[in-house]
Image (cartoon, rainbow, N blue to C red):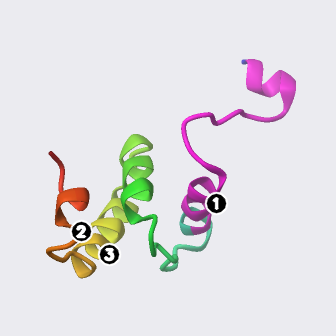
């Protein structure tokens, strides 16, 4: 595979902060700071099949759900 020749993988579908949050969760298994990024981390977790991280993101989104942010938070 190309990655084994280059010795790295380009991940172009997410921002560095989101990738770092996802990796922190994978390698530590601990709660991660999702303030302001739970929706984006949720999408990444769904994309990579990280079910426990998805549940964690959904819980964080529910805790912060309000009338003011519901239109942005809930899927259209």
Say if 67 sits above or below 43 in the image.
below
Disc 3 versus disc 2: distance between alpha carbons? 13 Å
Mark 1: give few (<14), some (14-19) or many (20+) Cα within 10 Å: few
1 vs 2, front mark: 2
State the image coordinates of residue 76 (x, y, percent, origin top left). 15, 45
Quick one: SS at disc 2? loop
Q: Residue at x 40, y 65 (%)?
A: 38
Q: Which residue is mark 1?
A: 20
Disc 1 versus disc 3: distance between alpha carbons? 18 Å
Left or right: residue 53 compared with residue 15: left
Q: Which residue is mark 3?
A: 60
Mark 3: give few (<14), some (14-19) or many (20+) Cα within 10 Å: some
Q: Where, by quadrant of the figure, is residue 18 drawn?
A: bottom right
From this viewpoint, which residue is outermost toward the right?
Answer: 6
In this rendered view, identify the residue nearer to me: 60 or 55: 60
Q: Which mark is residue 51?
A: none
Q: Which residue is mark 2?
A: 69
Q: Residue at x 20, y 72 (%)?
A: 68
**Start-end of magenta stretch:** 2-24
Quick one: SS at disc 1? helix
Q: Where, by quadrant of the figure, is residue 17 drawn?
A: bottom right
Specify which label sits upstream in the sequence, 1 or 2.
1
From this viewpoint, which residue is outermost toward the front?
Answer: 68
Say if 49 sits above or below 1 in the image.
below
């Amino acid at each position: 595979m190309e990655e084994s020749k280059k010795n790295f993988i380009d991940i172009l579908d997410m921002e560095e902060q989101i990738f770092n949050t996802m990796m922190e969760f994978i390698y530590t298994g601990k709660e991660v700071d999702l303030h302001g990024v739970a929706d984006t981390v949720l999408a990444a977790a769904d994309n990579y099949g990280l079910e426990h991280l998805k549940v964690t993101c959904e819980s964080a989104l529910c805790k912060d759900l309000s009338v003011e942010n519901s239109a942005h938070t809930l899927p259209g």
